[in-house]
Image (cartoon, rainbow, N blue to C red):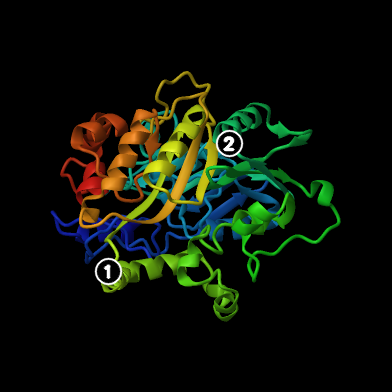
């Protein structure tokens, strides 16, 4: 910890404080910086308590490494974000989500306490109660504007070795939403317990809801499927009624092909796929290739050569109340036209605390079911592309539907709207206390001004 404090002190005043991480899951363009915060040595699992079902983990530990440590004990975090290199600290100071979020909420809701390096160079321990309770509750979605998590104590849950999944087809988004509500309320479907839920909207009249059951279910005794080779998981969602996966492969089912985005690199072509080493079929490799393209403008040059309109990158995850999902998808099809769209229900796990805004920096309403819609690609819009017209329209539509947007990618909100959506007044009070010299970049500056 002394090395971390020394690294913080060595960064000159006025220079952005940023983590020196090997990987990133952010999609906001950022200027390169030198002298970033040295977090080497903060990427491990400290301890696993198999009796209490808890783990102490360093902030830069990836979920891939954490799962590798817990799964041999039949345990996993309550929410395991879908990409291997997301870190525990990143999933909490940002926002993570996955198919268990309909019953376990978001990753920060299973945090029991955490140590935070604040802007004044101190490390404080924050918990739901006590002196730093407001810092604890405001930290999720603060993206480093309040500090960086160096240690987290989190809850784990017991799981079996296999997962049985069912893919249920729908032709109407409203009916899809009604079934989601029923599953969230009852925790079961057609007589079987449901432990995890997500879905894919392939087309306006082709939506698939994937219901996962911890255990082999009716497929007991059969060999689990393997989607790390020639078969591609997202295609199986549309092609199969049910399936069996190992717990390990279920957790990382989306990482191998970065959902379906690996197709941009030719990996949906069987020949290319055979030649592409398995160890490189993972999200962090694809992310580096995207970064290479953004630095050198490779795709933009090809578009100019082919006389195509300039592209706007539309890489977003948003949440809308489940009853507004159909309305959002109808608008999205008409105005954006990007498919597939990933759909993941979520509900605050601790929604019965009585607090109106239990997590003020990302204020979902307790007791209300939302659906995350994730869409990642580009849209040809012409010379206005650098100004983000499609992204701006998405922000306005989501707000009109009483929804929210994650901030891992580009954002275009004006200051007044941003302040209202992400409770900037509360963040400023905490920054005045823990970062009086303003060493850390504010959330608005990180999310909006620095793109």
Whether residue 315 appears in this view of the structure is yes
Q: Which residue lies furthest to the left in this view?
A: 14
Q: Percent from the top left, x then y, of residue 87?
A: 45, 55
Residue drawn at point x = 57 percent, y = 32 percent: 177
Checking the image for residue 307, the label placed there is: 1
Q: Percent from the top left, x then y, of residue 283?
A: 48, 63
Left or right: 125 in relation to 236: left
Label 2 belongs to which residue?
A: 172
Residue drawn at point x = 50 percent, y = 33 percent: 326
Count the marks: how many? 2
Whether residue 119 appears in this view of the structure is no
231, above or below 400, in the image: below
Toward the viewer: 315 or 83?
A: 315
Residue drawn at point x = 42 percent, y = 27 percent: 358
2 vs 1, front mark? 1
Toward the viewer: 387 or 47?
A: 387
Q: Earlier in the sequence, mark 2 or mark 1?
A: 2
Which quadrant would residue 331 be assigned to in this image?
Answer: top left
């Amino acid at each position: 910890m002394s090395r971390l404090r020394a690294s913080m002190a060595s960064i000159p005043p006025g220079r952005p404080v940023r983590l020196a991480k090997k990987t990133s899951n952010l999609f906001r363009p950022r200027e390169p910086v030198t002298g970033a915060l040295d977090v080497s040595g903060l990427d491990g699992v400290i301890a696993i308590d198999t009796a209490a079902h808890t783990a102490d983990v360093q902030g830069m530990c990836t979920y891939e490494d954490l799962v590798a440590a817990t799964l041999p004990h039949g345990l996993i975090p309550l929410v395991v974000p879908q990409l291997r290199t997301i870190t525990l600290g990143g999933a909490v100071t940002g926002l993570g989500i996955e198919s268990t979020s309909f019953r376990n909420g978001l990753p920060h809701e299973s945090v029991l306490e955490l140590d935070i390096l604040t802007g004044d160079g101190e490390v404080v321990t924050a918990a739901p109660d006590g002196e730093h309770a407001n810092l604890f509750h405001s930290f999720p979605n603060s993206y480093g504007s309040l500090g960086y998590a160096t240690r987290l104590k989190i809850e784990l849950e017991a799981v079996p070795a296999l997962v049985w999944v069912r893919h249920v087809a729908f032709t109407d988004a409203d009916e899809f939403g009604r079934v989601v509500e029923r599953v969230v309320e009852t925790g079961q479907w057609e007589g079987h317990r449901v432990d995890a839920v997500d879905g894919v909207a392939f087309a306006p009249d082709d939506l698939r809801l994937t219901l996962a059951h911890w255990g082999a279910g009716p497929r007991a005794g059969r060999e689990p499927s393997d989607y790390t080779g020639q078969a591609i998981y997202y295609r199986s969602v549309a092609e199969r009624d049910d399936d069996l996966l190992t717990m390990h492969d279920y957790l990382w089912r989306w990482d191998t092909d970065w959902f379906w985005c690996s197709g941009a690199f030719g990996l949906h072509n069987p020949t290319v796929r055979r030649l592409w080493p398995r160890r490189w079929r993972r999200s962090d490799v694809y992310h580096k290739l995207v970064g290479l393209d953004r630095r050198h403008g490779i795709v933009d040059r090809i578009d100019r050569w082919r006389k195509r309109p300039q592209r706007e990158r539309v890489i977003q995850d948003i949440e809308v109340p489940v009853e507004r999902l159909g309305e959002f998808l109808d608008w999205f099809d008409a105005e954006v036209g990007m498919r597939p769209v990933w759909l993941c229900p979520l509900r605050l796990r601790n929604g019965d605390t009585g607090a109106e805004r239990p997590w003020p920096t990302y204020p979902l309403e307790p007791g209300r079911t939302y659906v995350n819609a994730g869409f990642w690609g580009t849209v040809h819009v012409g010379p206005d592309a650098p100004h983000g017209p499609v992204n701006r329209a998405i922000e306005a539509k989501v707000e009109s539907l009483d929804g929210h947007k994650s901030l891992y990618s580009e954002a275009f909100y004006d200051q007044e709207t941003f302040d209202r959506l992400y409770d900037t007044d509360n963040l400023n009070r905490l920054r005045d206390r823990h970062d009086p010299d303003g060493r850390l970049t504010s959330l608005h500056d990180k999310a909006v001004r620095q793109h």
